[in-house]
Amino acid sequence: QVQLAESWGGSVQAGGSLRLSCAASGNNFRRFSKGWFRQAPGKEREWVATVESDGRPTYADFAKGRFTISNDNALNTLYLQMNSLKPEDTAMYYCAAGTMVADRAADHEYDYWGQGTQVTVSS
C-alpha cells in the first residue's frame, strides 16, 4: 500500500514558477511509475508527466520545455518543477503511482493517488 500527499501548490503570476512535492509512504515506491496529472474546473483530468522507475521522464506536449518531473528515492518524494507558468496551467494537481503502467497518459493505469494541491496562475 502506498499513500501520497502533495504539497507546495499556490498562487503565482504568469511567468512565475512553482515546485510541487509529493511525499510517499509505503514500501517499494522506487519501483513504481510515478506521474503528475491536473484537472481544471469543468475539464477532464489530464496527464502532465511521468517518471519511470529507471528515471526516464516523459511529458505531455504542453509541459515540454516548461515542466520537469523528478524524484528522490532516498526521500520517497516526487517533484514537479513548473516554470513560465500560464493562466491555463491553473488546476488541481495530483500525483499518482502505478506498478504496471502501460499507457502513461491514462489515469486508470495508476493505482495510487494523492488528494491534490491547487495551482492558480493569474495574468
Image (cartoon, rainbow, N blue to C red):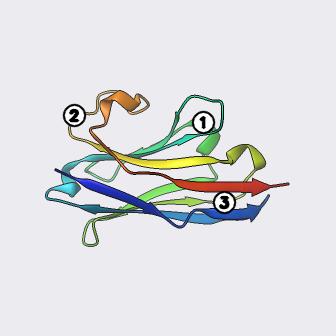
Q: Earlier in the sequence, mark 2 or mark 1?
A: 1
Mark 1 lies on residue: 61
Q: Position of residue 102 (x, y in %)?
A: 29, 28
As drawn, is 54 to the left or to the right of 89?
Answer: left
User: Label 2, label 1: how many angstroms apart (C-alpha)?
Assistant: 23 Å
Mark 2 lies on residue: 100
Mark 3 lies on residue: 83
User: Which of pointers 2 and 1 indicates the residue nearer the eye?
Assistant: 2
Element under disc 2:
loop
Dividing the picture into quadrants, the one containing residue 88 is: top right
Q: Residues within 10 Å of mark 1 (few under 14, many from 20)?
A: few
Q: Nearer the viewer, residue 3 or 57?
A: 3
Q: Residue at x 53, y 67 (%)?
A: 8
User: Label 3, label 1: how many angstroms apart (C-alpha)?
Assistant: 15 Å
Confirm or deny contact between disc 2 and disc 1 (CB under 8 A): no
Q: Position of residue 86 (x, y in %)?
A: 75, 50
User: Is residue 33 visible from the viewing direction of this image?
Assistant: yes
Element under disc 3:
loop
Amino acid type indicated by mark 1: Asp
Amino acid type indicated by mark 3: Asn
